[in-house]
Image (cartoon, rainbow, N blue to C red):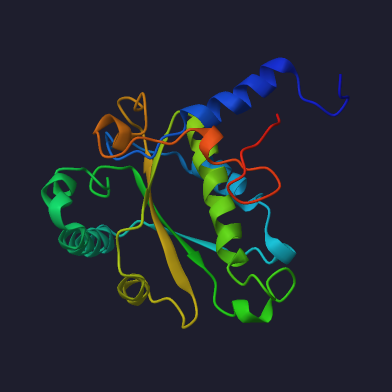
Amino acid sequence: MNKHAFSSAEQAAVYRVIAERRDMRHFCGGHVPDEQLLRLLSAAHHAPSVGLMQPWRFMRITDGELRTELHRLVEAERVRTAEALGERSDEFMRLKVEGLRDCAEVLVAALMEGREAHVFGRRTLPEMDLASLSCAIQNLWLAARAEGLGMGWVSLFDPVAVADVLGMPTGSQPVAILCLGPVERFYEQPMLVEEGWRTPRSLDELVYENRWGQERTTP
């Protein structure tokens, strides 16, 4: 037994929350208590970050008019995306792609300005700031699922337009609009699978050994 390992029950809980996390689009209003929201944001803040730069910034949207404007921007991009999809346009337009009008909380996850000053771990891979923010979002997502709250990541928006609406400084960048709150149920499978949009690929197809495309022999 590895002395650093958590108990079997604790390990099972970790793997369960990973397996049952869903990108939620259907919410039922409700409320997220301040102390619970703070716990979730604290989980996000404990994410790993390259060079300990902590590039994440989270904006809580409590202004109803601002939430409406964000919804308008998402809807505009949804239409543009449908046009770009060509023959799958009608199918895409039938999908529910956000829960901005129904969720209890709206958060905007963004990258800070002045990121070019952080060189540690980013000299050849500057996109590691985005990777760090993504880790923070995933922490928030898993913590929310563990507490029985749904969360959805909305990426259908023009980042320049959203940055302008939120008064963000030059060089910063909105990455995700996060819908958070109580749900009636969690999807049994990812929603896009339930809706027949896409079939997920197996792990075996995506893990190589030694060389790109070479089938693994272990584990």
Kindly identify the residue that appears in the image at 68 percent across and 71 percent down: 122
Kindly identify the residue that appears in the image at 58 percent across and 51 percent down: 135
Which residue in the rendered view is the most extreme toward the front? 214
Kindly identify the residue that appears in the image at 49 percent across and 75 percent down: 172
Which residue in the rendered view is the most extreme toward the top? 9
Residue 92 spot, x, y in % from top left: 18, 48
Kindly identify the residue that appears in the image at 14 percent across and 43 percent down: 94
The quarter of the picture where residue 3 lies is top right
Please give left or right for residue 14 compared with residue 148 in the image.
right
Residue 119 spot, x, y in % from top left: 71, 76
Residue 22 spot, x, y in % from top left: 41, 35
Q: Nearer the viewer, residue 124 or 139?
A: 124
Please give left or right for residue 134 compared with residue 164 in the image.
right
Residue 202 versus residue 125 in the image, above or below? above
Image quadrant holding the C terminus, namely top right
Residue 142 versus residue 168 in the image, above or below? above
Please give left or right for residue 57 compared with residue 2 in the image.
left
The quarter of the picture where residue 161 lies is bottom left
Q: Which of 213 and 94 is in front in this view?
A: 213
Image quadrant holding the N terminus, namely top right
